[in-house]
Amino acid sequence: MRRAAAEGDANALIRLLLRHTDLAQDAIARMCDLSQTMVSRVLSGQRELRKQETVRRVVEGITHGYEIPSPVMERVPPELGLALNGSPQKTAEVLGQVAGVDVEDLPGVKEQPPASAVSSAVLSWLVSGPASGGAEAHVAEGPVAAIRSASATFSALDNRFGGDNARAAAVHYLNGTVVPLLRKSHAEKAGRTLFAVSAEFVLSLAWMSYDAQRNGAARRYFVQALDLAAHAGDRLLGASVLSAMSHQANYVGAHAEARDLARAALAGAGERATQTMRAQFLMMEARAHASGQDKSACFQAMSEAERAFGRRDPGSDPEWIGYFDNAEYSDEVAHCHRDLGHAHVARRLAEQSLASSIGEEYARSRVFTRLVLAAAVLGQGEVEEACHLGSVVLPQVRATSSARCVGYLDAFARSVRPYRGQPTADRFLNQARAVVSTAQ
């Protein structure tokens, strides 16, 4: 109770009251100034209280008249999971610790570590020297096949429904299946295959955590995926991890770090990188430059990416880079032009991306692209059309357990606010506010 009160966790306070007191639901509802129906939904897990005013009212209602001392709050050790490890067994130990603080939701686990905290890990990986272009191919049997299948399943859930949809189950699988396997001794070739598929699984968990905006946990999973890729001798997979870290750094506003991570991915992969990989890494660099408003550097990186993408041979690519197709490439370029204020080009490329994307496999990505399109249309001065595009995507944001989708929506809504007073803008802003506030 002390911890929940100190953290302002209204949902935990309500559940603890019912579990450890004789209070009925209607009594708890009166204390919290909520309806009994709302209390019932919180207790059953159907609803989480997130609105700041509601949370404050509940905490004050439950704790009023009591002096509840704040507990000494354990925090995530700042260095946990942010370095490469000397052995797979050590990696297994660290992964277990990271998963533990993630599950316990310790203070600091959601906070993005500073760039300096991971720079030594990146440097260690860069200078370790390539053992091979990728992990040696072996027949996927038993546990290796299971982990590979789990990774594909969780990635598909993430791409379609958002990172929070099955993230808890992925952490449980990491602790219950992947970590115990990593603790065992393996023959060299079999071990490399296991480390590679484990790296892919931890990378998928990192993406899920990033999408849920648990950025501290995500960064730690990214670094441990990099370590596993190093144990596998798979430089290309390791470079892909750095590219993913660049994506995250750019999203949270660390544009210089994002640029450096993208460059490290390209340098670390070296000549073994396929043209698809080169294009993807270069687009991460271009995204960082666009966010930092460095137009010249952005255009240089985009130009190199365009040449590489035009020469790509999908048949020579590892399976994990297969998502970087025409739709994804056009989306990345559209993001750059949106950030640079080139509304006409951003609109054309966003429309091109959406036209190339079919099926429900990447439903979340289309939410991002549709909101980039809406922002580009607004940049052209078409307020009514832009608000219509924003309204159309609201059900998809609501149906996707993605904090990033909510962030994109909130950012677009902020750009619409100068047009308040226009009926279409006011209607959209009211609708968007309801979606964003429900998700917070």
Image: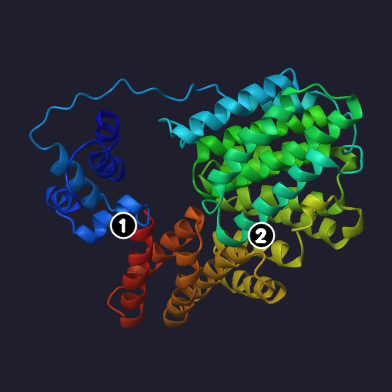
- On the question of residue 7 being in view, the answer is yes
| Viewer-proximal residue among 24 and 133 | 24
Q: Which residue lies furthest to the left in this view?
A: 65
From the top left corner, tell me how far across and down residue 161 is, in percent: 56, 60
- On the question of residue 50 being in view, the answer is no
Residue under the point 48% across and 66% down: 399
Amino acid type at mark 1: Arg
From the top left corner, tell me how far across and down residue 243 is, in percent: 69, 43
Which residue is denoted by mark 1 in the rendering? 41
Q: Answer above or below: position of 360 versus 241.
A: below
Q: Residues within 10 Å of mark 1 (few under 14, many from 20)?
A: few
| Viewer-proximal residue among 434 and 97 | 97
Q: Residues within 10 Å of mark 2 (few under 14, many from 20)?
A: many
From the top left corner, tell me how far across and down residue 6 is, in percent: 26, 32
Q: Answer above or below: position of 306 versus 223.
A: below
The disc at residue 332 is: 2
The disc at residue 174 is: none
Q: Is residue 57 left or right of residue 292?
A: left
Mark 2 to mark 1: distance in Å? 40 Å
From the top left corner, tell me how far across and down residue 114 is, in percent: 52, 30
Residue under the point 37% across and 68% down: 432
Looking at the image, is mark 2 or mark 1 earlier in the sequence?
1
Q: Which residue lies furthest to the top in this view?
A: 86
Tally of numbered discs: 2
| Viewer-proximal residue among 41 and 381 | 41
- Which colouring convention does the figure follow? rainbow
For the residues bearing labels 2 and 1, Cβ distance under 8 angstroms: no
Residue under the point 24% across and 25% down: 70
Residue under the point 16% across and 44% down: 23
Q: Answer above or below: position of 259 versus 385.
A: above
Disc 1 element? helix
